[in-house]
């Protein structure tokens, strides 16, 4: 029997930052973090740095410590998400997208500076200091123009924890080092999108569904410049998957799946046919969760 759980949970606003770095050979890598196995949401999954938008991200005073505030009204609506994205990126990975008073990108130039920034990160994670206070102390300004709006995902209605998440891409800030916070996340890795997808299929790591699908999309690009160019013009229609269960398996149906509307309207097959396991050339339409692994499938017209 296939069924869904109808939970009227209002999604919390959240931000995610996909950090891109030139690969040593060709193409680019992304920074992924492994969430702690005891995390209430996506435990043991590899994800991008990110988290919930909090009240301090909408504090009017923090705008005094922001560089390149967007003038477009639609972009202004993203301001709290952008500020939250930079804050969460710093908390979870240690990377800070900022400029100094001379307009130069923030870097960590020596061990003493590195220790100072590490302490700030620790205090911020413990909520003993705010991002605004750090910026004020250090004479820094958030580099909003280093974030590019990439996608918009909403957690399925069946989830007891839901998020309205805006995804941004950013170049790796030279002169800084990314690392897991060892609390919410236990491991940090740089991987090319295709490599991460292959490791997920081999169950060497587990990619969260949004991470898996965005990595699949990112694998189509050859350069960081292509990703940024797409971000400036690409479709940002919110993606709201369906989450359903069959026997002991859960599966996620994306809006572009051939059967999305059928499942949404309650037209449930006796035994769902998920199609074939996705290759790098496919556009994954659903993800099956089995034994703690997320397996991408592609439902094609003839499957």
Image (cartoon, rainbow, N blue to C red):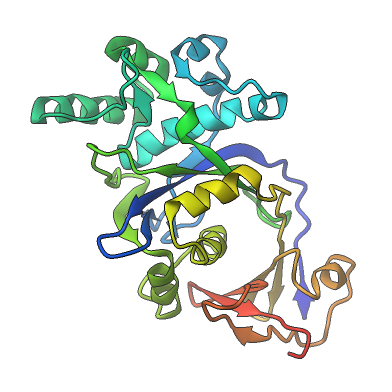
Q: Is residue 174 found left or right of 4 in the rendered image?
A: left
Q: Is residue 130 visible?
A: no
Q: Is residue 110 found left or right of 258 in the rendered image?
A: left
- Residue 193: which quarter of the image? bottom left
The residue positioned 39% from the left and 43% from the top of the image is 171
Quadrant location of the N terminus? Answer: bottom right
Measured from the top left, where is residue 82 in percent x and y? Answer: 53, 31
Q: Closer to the camera, 249 or 98? A: 98
Q: Can residue 122 be seen in this view?
A: yes
Which residue ends up furthest to the left in the rendered image? 111
Tell how many labels.
0
Can you say whether 19 is above or below 71 in the image? below
Q: Closer to the camera, 193 or 51? A: 193
Q: Closer to the camera, 184 or 141? A: 141
- Residue 244: which quarter of the image? bottom right
The residue positioned 38% from the left and 74% from the top of the image is 199
Measured from the top left, where is residue 80 in percent x and y? Answer: 58, 26
Measured from the top left, where is residue 106 in percent x and y? Answer: 29, 26
Can you say whether 119 is above or below 137 in the image? below
Measured from the top left, where is residue 94 in percent x and y? Answer: 30, 37
Quadrant location of the C terminus? Answer: bottom right
Can you say whether 30 is above or below 25 in the image? above
């Amino acid at each position: 029997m296939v069924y869904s759980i109808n939970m009227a949970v209002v999604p919390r606003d959240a931000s995610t930052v996909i950090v891109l770095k030139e690969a040593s050979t060709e193409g680019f890598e992304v920074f992924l973090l492994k969430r702690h196995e005891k995390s209430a949401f996506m435990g043991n999954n590899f994800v991008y740095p990110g988290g919930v938008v909090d009240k301090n991200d909408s504090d009017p005073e923090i705008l005094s410590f922001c560089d390149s505030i967007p003038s477009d009204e639609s972009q202004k609506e993203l301001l709290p998400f952008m500020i939250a994205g930079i804050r969460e990126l710093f908390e979870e990975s240690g990377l800070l997208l900022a400029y100094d008073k001379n307009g130069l990108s923030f870097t960590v130039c020596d061990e003493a500076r590195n220790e100072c920034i590490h302490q700030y990160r620790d205090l911020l994670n413990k909520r003993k200091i705010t991002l605004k206070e750090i910026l004020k102390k250090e004479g820094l300004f958030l580099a909003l123009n280093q974030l590019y709006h990439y996608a918009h995902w909403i957690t399925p209605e069946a989830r007891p924890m839901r998020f309205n998440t805006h995804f941004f891409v950013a170049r790796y800030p030279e002169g800084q080092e990314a690392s897991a916070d060892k609390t919410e996340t236990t491991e940090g890795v740089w991987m090319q999108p295709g490599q991460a997808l292959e490791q997920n299929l081999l169950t060497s790591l587990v990619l969260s569904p949004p991470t898996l699908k965005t990595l699949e999309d990112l694998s189509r690009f050859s350069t960081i410049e292509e990703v940024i160019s797409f971000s400036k013009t690409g479709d940002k229609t919110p993606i709201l998957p369906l989450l359903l269960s069959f026997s002991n398996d859960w599966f996620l149906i994306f809006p572009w799946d051939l059967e999305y509307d059928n499942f949404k309207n309650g037209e449930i097959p006796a035994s769902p046919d998920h199609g074939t396991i996705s290759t790098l050339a496919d556009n994954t339409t659903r993800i099956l969760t089995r034994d703690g692994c997320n397996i991408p499938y592609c439902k094609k017209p003839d499957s």
